[in-house]
Amino acid sequence: MASDFWLIVGLGNPGKKYEGTRHNMGFMTADLLAERWSVAFSDHKGLAMLGKGAMNLEGRTVKFFLAKPLTYMNDSGNAVASISAYYQIEPDHIVVIHDDMDLEFGRIKVKAGGSAGGHNGIKSIDRSLGTPKYARVRMGVGHAKRGPNAHDNTVNWVLGGFGPDQRKQLPEFLADGADAAEDIVFKGLAKTQEMFNGR
């Protein structure tokens, strides 16, 4: 029996040294959602920080779990699969929030299915769930310099912090990401795509 809970997952890496980095956009957005809906996190099997809450929007209440995997980005799927199996949450009730280098900073795109676009967290979740058909909130962080050290540049870029200008815009950007996750739950994917993908 599938649960009527939703699972919203913010991707990132645990630990002080990753706090506030581009790769932790998902964690930061999850923290904002936790604040909005008074969700307290506790440990789920050492795989994730997990909290439970209820969102009340547009006269409806939806129960949801909010997760921040502790597995490091490349094994995010282990955490997501464990929680979804334990609470019987189907992929069509899962929303994953993650950083995306193919979008410039401040842009958000919403999608379900399709390619992982080189994002190791998404590849891991696709593998563990056995399907890419869950919703994704892609938070643009812009791209590293191309060139001879492209791979190292990319790693340093996603694990790097934001410049002063971007830091100023960050609160609003995170709020948009949190809104996008809520809209998927309450308005469905197609409507949310209309609202965000054309921006």
Image (cartoon, helix red, strand yellow):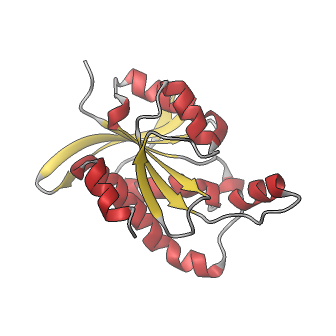
Which of 192/77 is in front? 192
Determine whether, in the image, residue 12 is placed left or right of residue 92.
right
Residue 95: x percent and y percent? 40, 43
Q: Is residue 83 left or right of residue 22?
A: left
Foreground residue among 47 and 184: 184
Extreme-right residue of the structure? 148
Q: Quadrant of the N terminus?
A: top left
Q: Is there any visible trace of residue 31 in the rendered image? A: no
Q: Residue at x 56, y 27 (%)?
A: 127
Quadrant (top left, top right, bottom left, bottom right) of the C terminus: bottom left
Residue 80: x %, y % from top left: 49, 32
Q: Is residue 95 visible?
A: yes
Q: Is residue 111 above or below residue 22?
A: above
Image quadrant assignment for residue 21? bottom right
* Image coords of residue 157 (percent x, y): 73, 61
Residue 74 sits above or below residue 146 on the image: above
Provide residue 134's location: percent of width, then percent of height: 40, 37
